[in-house]
Amino acid sequence: MADMEVDFRQYELRCELRGHDDDVRGICVCDSAGITTSSRDRTVRFWTPDPSAKHNYTSSKILLGHTSFVGPLTWISPNDEFPEGGIVSGGMDTLVLVWNLSTGEVVQTLRGHQLQVTGVVLDNEDIISSSVDCTLKRWRKGQAVESWEAHKSPVQAVIKLPSGELVSGSSDTTIKLWRGKTCSHTFVGHTDTVRSLAVMHGLGFLSASHDGSIRLWELTGEVLMEMVGHTSIVYSVDSHSSGLIISGSEDRSAKIWKDGICVQSIEHPGCVWDAKFLENGDIVTACSDGVVRLWTSNQDRVADKTELESYMSQLSQYKISRKRVGGLKLEELPGLDALQTPGTTDGQTKVVREGDSGVAYSWNLREHTWDKIGEVVDGPDDAVKSPILDGVQYDFVFDVDIGDGEPIRKLPYNRSDNPYDTADKWLLKENLPLSYRQQIVEFILQNAGQKSNPFDPSFRDPYTGASSYVPGGTSNISGGPAKPNFKHIPKKGMLAFDGAQFDGIVKKITEFNSALLSDEDKKHICLSELEVLRLGAIIKVLKDTSHYHTSKFADVDIALLLKLLHSWPPTMIFPVIDILRMTVLHPDGAKVLQKHFKDDNDMLMETFRRVTGDNPLAPNLLTSIRLVTNLFKNSLYHSWLLKHRNEASLVLFFCCLNTTFRKYL
């Protein structure tokens, strides 16, 4: 192993920069002037060296202007127009903003992208931006002078090479080299989204992917090096003139690579969204815990013992917060003081927290003591040990043996997925007969430990016009008299309609949109291709319930939904109302939507008036009453409900008149 040793000095914590209120998403090194960071808290911060603290930085400017989370950043070196330099930022709000650091003000607002801006880079005096809308745009003096579809899928990153060409990476797994608007080469190799790009001086460029790998490419298309070591999505990559490479990942680590070997992995108390090198070789990382951290291999700049111990304590607390024993979070277990309370029956067990472990005790009725049984085996850390397939993390990855000497196939599945959708997609991907569908569904439900719910065959789904088939649903018909089943009476707690047939919603909206497109008189109100993409992005956010605490909505998302409610015919709006029903259950979506509830322009009230107007339609009534019900789940809407209780009750009244839907209320 001696020939594998690499000359390398380990990095240690230098300092922490605190100020952001949410995930730090982007980093820009501004020469020797300082560091700029962007965040989900919708701000950009400029940090400058702190003269009172030798190795630290201070937040000297907070730049406010974006209306949703901010991501990519780039630096404008000082010039006549920007004496102290400038910053370009891109956001979820589709805007590219140019900031003058002398004043901290926005000097240019670049509008034109239809979806989230994912990358910004300077090309001489021009600005190049990439977006989820699949385009690259060139901006000059505040105006878009060029725009072209760079990929068929969202563009996730763009950089400029020293030779002047642009390089873009996409969700279509490819990388493209651009000379002007002409693609001169397409790089193929990654098996999932290309998320980040960086120049590797003298060699080519680096790419980081959702497939968990980092690649070094020569401009000819040859892969010079592939670095594998992350256990989840790799969000960022950067290089230093020394030859070192840094990468940041969903697996909560920043990894340092030298000559293709991972020489150090720096743990973080959260996802590492971005990582960059300073000129002196120090590293800056952006973490989902809202903290920017600097790391150094120079002992003169290492944080003092107290700061290092504090950071290790943060890591330990974070691990404890995610650790599970006996199916419970370790941090939620009682401490040893719980053993001061006598048990009630002989053999009663109690699990308490002792340090970083859960320990089980049994109550000894004869001795009147708690007897120690032993340490409870830890459950898996869901963020690290969940199975990975093709760089994506799943709740389960099943081995499927289809027989006939065929190799074992991998079947990924998440608990929140529809097993029928999963089965269909997997069978198509593996080129297997669809006749296997029911077997695959039963296999998934059995191995995932999930139970199916019976369905009422008399219910007619507004999306399909037929009975909604619930996975594994069984008939309630039997030869004898049915037993009374008071499932909903008495009702305990508040009912919320928190499930949605998103595939059916999308299918129905697509069907309606096609109908409008074929009608010359109504063609002008149909969805554009970019609006279809944005709608897909909204659905993706709503489906991913595990990230509701971090995912965000932009004003343009809500504006699109309200536009459809206002402009589409009443017969076509029920799937849009259904999307709103789910949006009010999303923490950020509910906040953004509430801004449109104004006395002089209350879009929600206007929708209810359309629904309860002449000849109310059953699908509209059904989706509307479910929307009203979900409003009660969020305190933001309680005052609105109180104010409009009569109008909201009218929706319920019309539903009660409709015998088809009455029993589902």
Image (cartoon, helix red, strand yellow):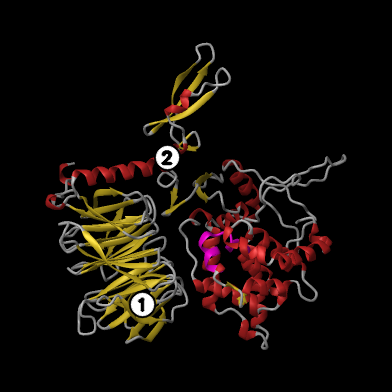
* Relative to 629, 615 lies left or right: right
Q: Position of residue 142 (x, y in %)?
A: 35, 85
Q: Nearer the viewer, residue 595 or 389?
A: 595
- Foreground residue, 216 or 104? 104
The structure residue drawn at horizontal position 42% and vertical position 74%, both measured from the top left corner, is 151
Residue 95, image x, y percentages: 41, 76
Image location of residue 351, percent across then percent down: 48, 28
Disc 1 target residue? 97
Mark 2 or 1, nearer chain start: 1
**How far is the residue under mark 2 from the one under mark 1?**
41 Å
Q: Position of residue 554 (x, y in %)?
A: 49, 70
Q: What residue range appears in magenta?
A: 581-593
Residue at image point 54% right, 14% down: 365
> Quadrant location of residue 521?
bottom right
Amino acid of disc 2:
Lys
Quarter of the rendering occupied by the N terminus: top left
